[in-house]
Image (spheres, rainbow, N blue to C red):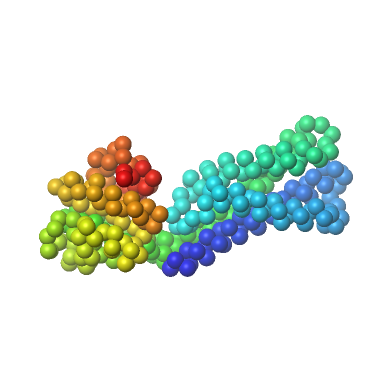
């Protein structure tokens, strides 16, 4: 499953490269037409054309990899991705404008403005088009259950059971592959044990995460167990680069000022912003 996700990230990057290549090729043709008054296929004999369609797309991919991050497509928010793409492309086009386009010969300043706008529209439209297609495909695969993440539940009584049943009964998948639960109350039996195996106790969370290669952790402890939450988060903090942590909504009030709401999945789970988790 991870291999497929890695392939999808590579495909995402390849399409970014190809869209940047196409955008620059179209922009190069546009500039030649503006210079000569007509389109000329002889631009294909221009060495600068071939240098540009290689180096410029590589520059875009480098920019995206630094600021946008080529991460798991199935974790991405399309809205946030599109907003980030807009600003990155604006910055990138400004850089190209002041380093390359200003050296071109134009009749007046209107020509500079038109060149800037054309390049921005080409780069933004083509990039958003490919990303929209790939992210929509990823979303559909996730909802169809074709992509899953190794998941454990911390807690095993009423709230954990209700959450598990609610998620399991959803018509569209959220990508959880439940491997078991962590006993949060110290009892030998839990209501959730009828559906999932008990993998250990709270003091064994780290060991379970490593052994089971856990990617998602859902905290569903009882109200009487809230005093253990700080200790649980302290442990999970050590694995912030490996896992995503979610909580059930009615626990969010005790987290105010400590964590940030990132995504809401229906009325089921709230994702914790890992960078703001207390240590």
Above or below residue 101? Residue 172 is below
> Which of the 4 image quadrants contains residue 151?
bottom left
- Please name whichever residue, 197 or 74, is drawn nearer the observer in this view of the structure: 197
Q: Is residue 195 left or right of residue 30?
A: left
- Please name whichever residue, 52 or 233, is drawn nearer the observer in this view of the structure: 233
Q: In this view, does 36 lie to the left or right of 265?
A: right
Q: Is residue 1 visible?
A: yes
Q: Residue at x 75, y 52 (%)?
A: 52
Residue 198, x across and y down, in percent: 20, 65
Q: Quadrant of the C terminus?
A: top left
Q: Is residue 22 visible?
A: no
Q: Which residue is drawn at 23% across and 53% down?
A: 220
Q: Residue at x 27, y 41 (%)?
A: 255
Q: Residue at x 73, y 55 (%)?
A: 53
Residue 23, x across and y down, in percent: 69, 51
Above or below residue 184? Residue 106 is above
Residue 1, x across and y down, in percent: 43, 68
> Which of the 4 image quadrants contains residue 112?
top right
């Amino acid at each position: 499953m991870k291999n497929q996700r890695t392939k999808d990230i590579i495909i995402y990057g390849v399409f970014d490269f190809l869209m940047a290549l196409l955008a620059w090729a179209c922009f190069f043709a546009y500039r030649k037409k503006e210079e000569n008054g007509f389109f000329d296929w002889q631009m294909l004999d221009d060495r600068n054309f071939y240098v540009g369609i290689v180096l410029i797309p590589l520059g875009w991919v480098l920019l995206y990899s630094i600021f946008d991050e080529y991460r798991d497509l199935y974790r991405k928010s399309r809205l946030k991705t599109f907003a980030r793409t807009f600003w990155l492309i604006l910055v990138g086009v400004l850089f190209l404008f002041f380093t390359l386009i200003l050296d071109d010969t134009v009749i007046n300043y209107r020509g500079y403005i038109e060149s800037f706008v054309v390049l921005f529209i080409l780069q933004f439209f083509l990039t958003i088009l490919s990303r929209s297609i790939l992210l929509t495909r990823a979303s559909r695969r996730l909802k169809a259950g074709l992509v899953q993440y190794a998941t454990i539940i911390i807690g095993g009584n009423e709230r954990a059971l209700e959450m598990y049943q609610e998620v399991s009964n959803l018509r569209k998948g959220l990508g959880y592959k439940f491997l078991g639960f962590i006993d949060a109350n110290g009892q030998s039996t839990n209501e959730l044990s009828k559906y999932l195996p008990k993998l250990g106790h709270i003091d064994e969370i780290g060991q379970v995460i490593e052994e089971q290669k856990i990617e998602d952790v859902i905290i569903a402890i009882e109200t009487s167990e809230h005093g253990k939450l700080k200790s649980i988060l302290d442990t999970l903090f050590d694995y912030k680069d490996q896992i995503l942590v979610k909580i059930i909504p009615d626990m969010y009030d005790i987290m105010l000022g400590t964590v940030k709401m990132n995504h809401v999945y229906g009325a089921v789970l709230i994702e914790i912003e890992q960078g703001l988790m207390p240590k």
